[in-house]
Image: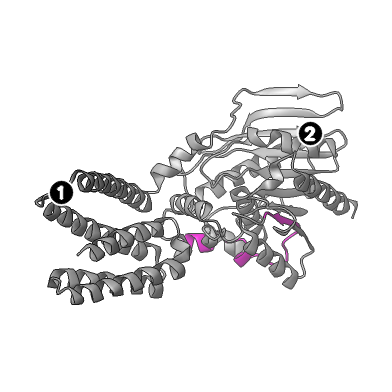
Amino acid sequence: MKTQKYIDIFILIITIMIFIFFNKLYLIVPIILLTLFLRVVNIYKNKGGKLQLFFSIVVFILMLLTLILNSYLFTIFTTMFTGIVFLILLIIDIRISKKKNHTKSQKLIRGIGLVGLTVLMLGYVSLSYNSLFPDSLTRSTQHIFPGKVVANKSVEKNKDGSFYYKNLTYPSKYKNNKMDIYTSKNAKGTIFYVHGGGYAFDDKSEREEFLFRYVKAGYNVINVNYQLTPDIRYPETLEQVNDALTFITENAKDYNINLNKMVFSGDSAGGQLTGQLINIMNNKEYAEEVGVKPANSDIHFKPKGYIAMGALTKPTHIANTDFFLTDWLFDTLGRSYFNTTDVLHSNKAKQASVIDHVTKDFPSTFISDGNFGTFTKDSKEFEGRLDELNVPVESQFYSQSEEKLFHVYELDVNNKYAKKIYQEHVKFLDNLFEK
């Protein structure tokens, strides 16, 4: 039954794709269902065994349910079960085939097939492990995407009158509790900035060149580090960023910071953290629900503005970037951070949503995002939500027909579109503080 063997191999290959393209089930599963149907027809035609028929029907039903339930955990279970079943069926077929006499070329083909089958098995094992235990890959991202880390405390006085205070320690029970404060002479206002990296990698030092430009434009910048997941998880990271802000409220005079002239900002996960921080500052009931006491509880002030760059404003959609590799990576990081098997249906991820908890008290906002492998749809939804609440909002989105712009392209100081965004940021800030 050579046809059945080829069908089994095809099912194995297409099924393993679910681990990566799990957000495209509506494209992959129908192909598997059709192939399983052809397999059943082939079994009947060749009078195959009842066991073969039974497993084909069971897998068909499970695959059908993945479309209906749309649950990550159930999808992974079905994928793993399908892989195990068809790997066993192919191994049995190979053992039967081994008893037959083969020519040298047939033996070579059979050997190549065994190698391919071994690779598939390793793929299933590694992808299954990551699906169930995301912390391992999450921790590895710090090595996959190594960031420059500067640990020494220092103070730099520049010719233009600015000061760079690097690696100041702010009180927190969590590690990596460091921040930089870049002060501009006669500062117009202050930017409180938190870096991204899926909550799992990157460092404030990687944002220096990007942020120094704002100092030259006349603004103080607070550049915050935090302990990375999976060593801490939601909402602990938010609590730590709030610790950093508390330090600023208590030491504002020492760095010539006017708390009533602060703009919160961040890229990717950092944009989510600062956006959620604003929400808990604006809503006492929401702050109590999250379990974080806002830094402005004792010293009353409100952020003057918010600048979001590729911000994760809806964490349940962390794997909806329309690019399979970022979908897969971001989903892994999200499952670690929110400590869940299914971010889409996670109550913690829903609670962390900036969009779903924003109020009319949210400050004036500037939103930008790329158009490939990023959160463009949610960024536009966030803009629409702010419009509904009559919150002043500006935005800049470029279409792919102009240029393909990846997630947080804004950080690339040499990118011509990023340069335009920076100019828009400065205009936004200048207009904000002229009022």
The residue segment tinted magenta is: 347-370
The label nearer to you, 1 versus 2, is 1
Locate residue 335 relative to residue 209 in the image: left or right. Answer: left
Badge 2 crowding class, 10 Å Cα cut-off, few under 14, some 14 to 19, many 20 or more, is many
Locate residue 296 relative to residue 424 in the image: left or right. Answer: left
- The picture places residue 72, in percent across and down from the top left corner, at 40, 63
Tell me which residue sits at (44%, 40%) in the image. Answer: 139
Q: Judge whether 67 appears above or below 135 on screen.
A: below
Q: Nearer the viewer, residue 258 or 148?
A: 148
Count the numbered circles shown. Answer: 2
Tell me which residue sits at (76%, 54%) in the image. Answer: 305
Q: Nearer the viewer, residue 406 or 72?
A: 406
Picture quadrant where residue 321 is located: bottom right
The residue that mark 1 highlights is: 102
- The picture places residue 231, in percent across and down from the top left corner, at 44, 41
The amino acid type found where label 1 is placed reads His
The amino acid type found where label 2 is placed reads Thr
Sequence order check, earlier mark of 1 and 2: 1
Instruction: Identify the secondary structure beneath mark 2.
Output: strand
The residue that mark 2 highlights is: 183
Confirm whether residue 231 shows in the render: no
